[in-house]
Amino acid sequence: MKKKIEITIYGTEQLCPSCVNLPSSKETYEWLEAAISRKYPDQPFRISYVDIQAPPNDEKKREFAQKVMEEEMFYPVVLVEDRIVGEGNPKLKTIYSEMEKYGYIAREKQ
């Protein structure tokens, strides 16, 4: 593995108006954390959740949270190392594919 990557999920407690019947952003964050941990055991990564209505003091995350709201993106928005890999209803296959570009190896391939 080349480096420990950062996965950031941007969203809010309120469900996306266009995302009826989908899990909340926070539920997606929890689901992704569990799924990625199972797929890439013993391969460290950082995953964080950013509430777009109350972003942290981190300037980069605050700016992207503002962008999500201004551009009316479908949330949750999932970033792997600052690259958008999912919006609204993120797909695990797309997220896994991006992680493997950084050298992560799936459990079944080890």
Image: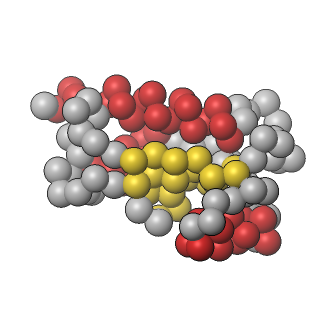
Q: Quadrant of residue 28?
A: top right
Q: Please give the name of the residue rendered at 45% of the width and 28% of the height, measured from the top-left corner.
A: 34
Q: Residue furthest front?
A: 57
Tell me: residue 78, above or below residue 20.
Answer: below
Residue 38: x %, y % from top left: 34, 26
The answer to whether residue 24 shows anywhere in this view is: yes
The x, y position of residue 73, in whole percent, is 73, 61
Question: Closer to the camera, 5 or 103?
Answer: 5
Q: Number of callouts in the render?
A: 0
Residue displayed at 45% across by 51% down? 7
Note whether 92 is above or below 81 in the view shown: above
Query: Does 22 sit left or right of 96 as displayed?
Result: right
Q: Is residue 85 visible?
A: no
Q: Position of residue 102 (x, y in %)?
A: 25, 56
Q: x and y percent of residue 52 in the render?
A: 72, 57
Query: Which residue is most to the right?
Result: 17
- 106 left or right of 32 in image: left
**Residue at (86%, 47%) from the top-left corner?**
17
Q: Residue sitting at 70 percent across and 71 percent down? A: 67
Q: How is the image coloured?
A: secondary structure
| Residue 98 horizontal side relative to residue 2, left or right | right
